[in-house]
Structures are given as C-alpha cells and as structure tokens.
C-alpha cells in the first residue's frame, strides 16, 4: 500500500477570534493558498463554531478547506450548547477535529466518546481528525507508546479506512508550550501509531498522521520531515496567516 502523497496542514484556532479577526485571517490564508497554487498538499482551517459559516464563505474557491473543532455524537436533539456533525457540514465544513486533549481534559471526553464523535463525522460526511497524545507524566514514566496504543484502539471506529480517517499525534506537554519532541521521538511515536493502525485499518500505510504541538514556521520543515509524518495540526501559529502559510510551504 503506497503512502499518501498529499500532506495536510490543519489550523486549529481553538477559542479565538471575533468575526472581524477570523475573516481577516481566513482571507489571508485563502489569498496565500491561491497564490501558491498548491496541488500537492491540503490546507485546512478549523475556526470556532461561530465563524464556520462566514469563514467557509470567505475562502470559497481558494482551495482552503474548513473544519470544526469538535462535534456532538448525536445528529440533533436536546443537547444545549452542542453542535452536531451535520450542523458543521451544513455550515460548510468538510472535516472535524475530535478528541483534542483540551476536550478530553476540559470536558472529560473518553476514548469511547471520541469514537462516537468520529462515527458521527462519518454519518455527516465529514473527515474526522482523531487526536491522541501522552501527558508529560506518562512520557516520563515511559508509557508514551502504550498510551497512544490504548487511545487509538479506543478512539478509532471499526471500519476506518485512509479515506475516512486522519490521526493527529499531539503530545499534551508540547501543546502551547514551545516544547516539541525531538525528530526521532516524533518518528518513533508515528511509527508505533502506524503499526497499531495496521491492526485497525486495512490501508494503514495511507492514513494521514499529523504531528501537533508547538509547530511554527521555523521548526515545521524538520518536524514534517520526520518518518511517518504526513502533515501538521497547528494551534497558536495558525492564528497568523503568514506563519501558518510558512508551515504549509514547508510541507
Ligand atoms: P500549539 O500549536 O499552539 O502548540 O497547539 C497545538 C494544538 O493543540 C493543535 O490542535
């Protein structure tokens, strides 16, 4: 099975951005992507739910993809404050991040909940980006690979294929800290993720594995060159068009 040739560079805006900020940022990214004319990589931005519809409109025709940061597992109903995968799709999204460590921590999301959200994404016709990653304590205890394996087995739904799944490895201790694993550490984690995926997905070599955690323009080339890395999930650096485009360029 050939490895996928098209890296994915995804921006996770998290809980940031007024309508004015978000539209300016989206337009900046769309202009840069249009100008670059890339056909060998995909660029995705995931704004907060309030901005998805306006951002999808703003980037239309540029090739920039739009995603949600989370979704509820159910399509509709009495779930005050939640947003379903169907709603994201209706607003113009093609992707959705599920199981981000901030959701797992802030909202107590378990692997089973993340799996249900990934299934909801499929039901709505969205591509789920399933996030996994160890804490600092888990890494220091030598448990990184075991934690990743448990999270993957619990979070990836049965029936996953490379056409229906993206996995993001985000070490919790590297998120927003300016710290990153070394390139060999990233490669080792990704190799293990791909090995575990081999037991879960028929075409595991083609599943896109993103690295996330303090990716910026200056370290993107090195992190993206690590073995089994097929793109990046970018937080803080995705809030500046120029910085985010520099990461996309490095892919
Ligand atoms: P930072 O790039 O700000 O470290 O965030 C990474 C992240 O959580 C992306 O989902």
Image (cartoon, rainbow, N blue to C red):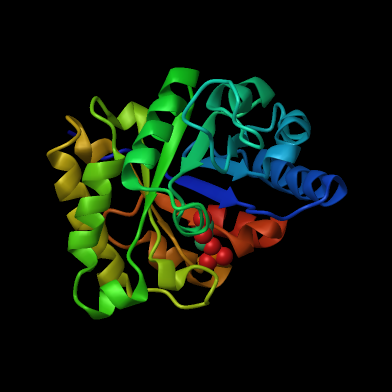
Image position of 28 with respect to 238: above or below:
above
Q: Looking at the picture, how far across and down is residue 131, in whole percent?
A: 40, 50
> How many numbered discs?
0
What residue is at 42 percent from the left and 51 percent from the top?
231
Q: In this view of the protein, which residue sits in the foreground, 231 or 13?
A: 13
Taking the image as shown, residue 222 lies to the left or right of residue 52, namely: left
Image position of 168 with respect to 81: above or below:
below
Image position of 210 with respect to 221: above or below:
above
Image position of 236 with respect to 91: above or below:
below
What residue is at 60 percent from the left and 29 percent from the top?
93
Is any atom of residue 200 visible in this view? yes
Q: Looking at the picture, how far across and down is residue 25, in whole percent?
A: 76, 50
Q: Looking at the picture, how far across and down is residue 79, in whole percent?
A: 59, 31
What residue is at 43 percent from the left and 34 percent from the top?
117
Taking the image as shown, residue 96 lies to the left or right of residue 138, namely: right
What residue is at 63 percent from the left and 57 percent from the top?
238
Q: Quadrant of residue 158?
A: top left
Q: Tell which residue pokes out farthest to the left in this image.
A: 199
Is any atom of residue 5 visible in this view? no
Q: In this view of the protein, which residue sits in the foreground, 86 or 229?
A: 86
Q: Looking at the picture, how far across and down is residue 9, in whole percent?
A: 51, 48
């Amino acid at each position: 099975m050939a490895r996928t040739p098209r890296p994915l560079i995804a921006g996770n805006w998290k809980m940031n951005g007024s309508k004015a900020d978000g539209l300016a940022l989206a337009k900046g990214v769309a202009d840069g992507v249009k100008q670059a004319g890339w056909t060998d990589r995909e660029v995705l931005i995931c704004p907060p739910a309030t901005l998805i519809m306006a951002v999808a409109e703003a980037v239309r025709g540029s090739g920039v993809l739009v995603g949600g940061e989370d979704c509820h597992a159910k399509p509709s109903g009495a779930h005050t404050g939640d947003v379903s995968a169907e709603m994201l799709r209706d607003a113009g999204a093609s992707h959705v991040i599920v199981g981000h460590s901030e959701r797992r921590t802030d909202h107590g999301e378990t692997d089973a909940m993340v799996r249900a959200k990934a299934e909801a994404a499929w039901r709505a016709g969205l591509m789920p980006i399933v996030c996994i990653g160890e804490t600092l304590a888990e890494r220091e205890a030598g448990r990184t690979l075991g934690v990743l394996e448990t999270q993957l087995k619990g979070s990836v739904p049965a029936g996953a294929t490379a056409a229906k799944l993206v996995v993001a490895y985000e070490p919790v201790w590297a998120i927003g800290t300016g710290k990153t694993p070394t390139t060999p550490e990233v490669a080792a984690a990704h190799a293990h993720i791909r090995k575990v995926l081999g037991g879960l997905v028929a075409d595991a070599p083609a599943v896109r594995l993103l690295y996330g955690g303090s990716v910026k323009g200056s370290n993107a080339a090195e992190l993206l060159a690590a073995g089994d890395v097929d793109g990046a999930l970018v937080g803080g650096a995705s809030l500046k068009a120029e910085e985010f485009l520099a990461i996309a360029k490095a892919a």
